[in-house]
Image (spheres, rainbow, N blue to C red):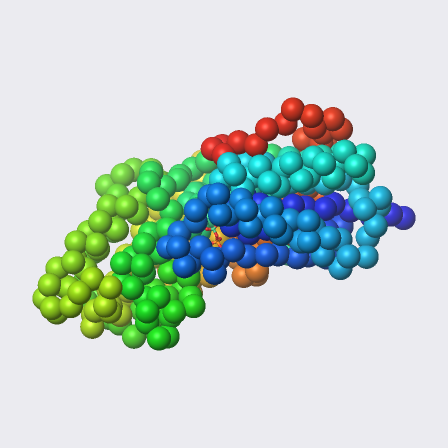
Amino acid sequence: FLHKLVLGIETSCDDTAAAVVDETGNVLGEAIHSQTEVHLKTGGIIPPVAQQLHRENIQRIVQEALSASKVSPSELSAIATTIKPGLALSLGVGLSFSLQLVDQLKKPFIPIHHMEAHALTIRLTNKVEFPFLVLLISGGHCLLALVRGVSDFLLLGKSLDIAPGDMLDKVARRLSLIKHPECSTMSGGKAIEHLAKQGNKLHFDFKPPMQRAKNCDFSFSGLQHVIDKMIMQKEKEEGIEKGQILSSAADIAASVQHTVACHIAKRTHRAILFCKQRNLLCQSNAVLVVSGGVASNLYIRKALEVVTNAAQCTFLCPPPRLCTDNGIMIAWNGVERLRAGLGILYNPEGIRYEPKCPL
Ligand code: KG4
Ligand code: ZN
């Protein structure tokens, strides 16, 4: 008996990743090349640079994933690749590479929605039935959705401006945490979490955003501007130049993290109650899945655990390496689609990537 085998390829942002996953969720091989180090130096992703790095690495990464899996390309059941949403230049590299491979190997092609793949990853590691709630929080994503099936999503809320990780990265940059001896190699969000442990979260009283909005949307840029102004004022008070580290940096980090956690937890609480009231989620067995880079923040997790406990909802997170961008989630989404008979293309000619694409 031969299991179905899917090769997954991901290049939507700044990771070049590939994996081979079988029908039962065994990860047979995987490889990833992260561009974080390069983008950290330039203070953000420069799309043509990301494109160039994807081009330089994609062949090797796919080869590594295949070799590690000991699967010969002819044994693959399909090739699944992220085609939306993401950076146009980055998506283009993965798509054109995949279309060549599909053509060479004469295999079916499964186009993948990056956010759907994030949302379904939990089903690779845990036995989670539909429907369930998912919260995706990272540098580029911020959404709350009800997952009703492999290709059936109800968007409940999203950020009206930037994602929480983006905001934490901006605050970390403004605080020059890259020059902090303890945080110089960490992402902005991780640096904030680290420093927050040494600070007083109640020192600055930032108002959680959108307190009166009766929906499940998010907003982070207003808060970011308030913090920017406050940092400028503190720099004046402490008589230091822009680029030096404030003595109050830890208190700022702790207060920012606290406010972001409260905001995320409150909006999520609303979504759980909304779904339960309308019987969109099982009353006795509701599940919230949280994923994305920001989900690795233990303070934010704690806040989410408090609201899920209060709402009698099970709280689940994929393991950290599956919370951030990876090839496994793309291959797994291919498996789910193959099993459900959804979106399998035998002639993918003319397929385009879509940088902007809602759930
Ligand atoms: O999922 P991810 O690797 O990439 C995308 O953005 O898609 O998430 C990266 C984001 C960055 O903004 C980073 O600052 C944030 O996740 N992040 C964190 C933590 N670790 C990473 N934010 C808060 N706390 C953390 N421990
Ligand atoms: Zn992602």
Please say if 307 is above or below 119. Answer: below
Q: Position of residue 151 (x, y in %)?
A: 60, 34
Residue 154 visible (yes or no): no
Q: Nearer the viewer, residue 298 or 192?
A: 192
In the figure, is residue 70 to the left or right of 129? right
Q: Is residue 226 visible?
A: yes
Residue at 68% across, 53% down:
60
- Can you give x and y, in whole percent of width and height, for residue 189 in the image? 38, 60
Residue 280: % across, % down: 50, 37
Q: Quadrant of ligand 1?
A: bottom left
In this rendering, the answer to whether 168 lies above or below 190 is above
Residue 26 x, y percent position in the rendering:
73, 56
- The quarter of the displayed image where residue 169 is located: bottom left
Q: Give the residue displayed 74% in from the left and 45% down from the top.
A: 6
Observer-nearest of 73 and 43: 43
Residue at x 33% of width, y 52% of height? 167
Residue 178 placement, left or right of 124: left
Q: Residue at x 32, y 66 (%)?
A: 177
Q: Residue furthest right?
A: 1
Q: Is residue 215 left or right of residue 248?
A: right
